[in-house]
Image (cartoon, rainbow, N blue to C red):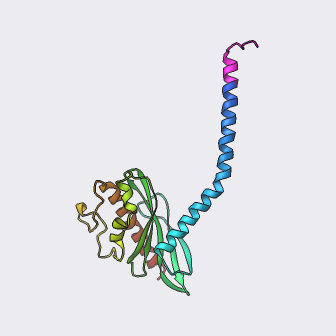
């Protein structure tokens, strides 16, 4: 078999075919996995709502643009037999060590925090990822931000920062503060 001469046109056509096949394969994988990924994300979100706002029978979705944000925050105002039992607030901050941190924060009608679930974070493993532990999240439970300063102690607040992960701790506090401000805004508008 004779060897083909390596020309610019042959190399270009070979590269074009390989690129086209790779693009088609990537597109096919995306289309196959798009729905299962969306379903898993929805289930994760619903589980977080149940964790931070137990006992609700239905909820009303309210989207609010925070004063200091670029994306809306979603409030799931919870009801049990037509009575408001609190809310789950899907909040975020871009101040994490590795950027975006998303939380679901539960509030009682008086503003007391019921629970917090971490939805998304890419913090440093073994350091910032400790924000997902009960030891860190637990210090917010049962606290009302009206009289609990949601800042790390280094900044004059009441939150014990994660050792060697002050930036991640500050980001967590920022997201919780943002959730509380939006929750208050929604409560004031609906009274």
Up the image or down, 39 lies above or below 99; here it is below
Q: Residue at x 34, y 65 (%)?
A: 136
Asked if one can make out residue 75 in the rendered structure from this viewpoint, the answer is: no
Asked if one can make out residue 16 in the rendered structure from this viewpoint, the answer is: yes
Relative to 33, 116 lies left or right: left
Label count reads 0
Nearest the camera: 127 or 121? Answer: 127
Relative to 120, 40 lies left or right: right
Residue 175 locus on image (x, y percent): 40, 63
Q: Quadrant of residue 144?
A: bottom left
Single out the residue that lies furthest toward the front. 1
Single out the residue that lies furthest toward the right. 1
Residue 151 locus on image (x, y percent): 29, 64
Q: Quadrant of residue 10?
A: top right
Which quadrant is home to the N terminus? top right
Q: Residue at x 58, y 64 (%)?
A: 42
Residue 24 locus on image (x, y percent): 69, 40
Q: Quadrant of residue 137?
A: bottom left
Q: Residue at x 36, y 59 (%)?
A: 130
Q: Residue at x 75, y 12 (%)?
A: 2
> Which contiguous range is marked in magenta?
1-13
Up the image or down, 123 lies above or below 89; here it is above
Relative to 130, 58 lies left or right: right
Q: Is residue 78 magenta?
A: no
């Amino acid at each position: 078999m004779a060897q083909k001469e390596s020309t610019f046109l042959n190399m270009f056509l070979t590269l074009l075919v390989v690129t086209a096949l790779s693009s088609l394969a990537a597109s096919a994988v995306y289309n196959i996995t798009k729905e299962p990924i969306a379903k898993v994300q929805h289930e994760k979100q619903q589980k977080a709502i149940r964790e931070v706002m137990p006992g609700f029978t239905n909820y009303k979705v309210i989207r609010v643009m925070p004063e200091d944000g670029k994306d809306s925050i979603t409030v799931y105002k919870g009801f049990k037999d037509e009575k408001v039992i609190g809310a789950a607030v899907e909040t975020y901050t871009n101040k994490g060590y590795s950027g975006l941190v998303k939380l679901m924060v539960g509030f009682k009608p008086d503003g007391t925090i019921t629970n917090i679930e971490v939805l998304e974070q890419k913090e440093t493993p073994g350091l910032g990822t400790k924000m997902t532990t009960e030891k860190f999240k637990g210090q917010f439970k049962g606290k009302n931000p009206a009289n609990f300063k949601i800042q790390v102690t280094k900044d004059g607040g009441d939150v014990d920062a994660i050792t060697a992960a002050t930036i991640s701790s500050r980001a967590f506090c920022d997201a919780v503060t943002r959730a509380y401000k939006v929750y208050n805004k929604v409560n004031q508008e609906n009274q």
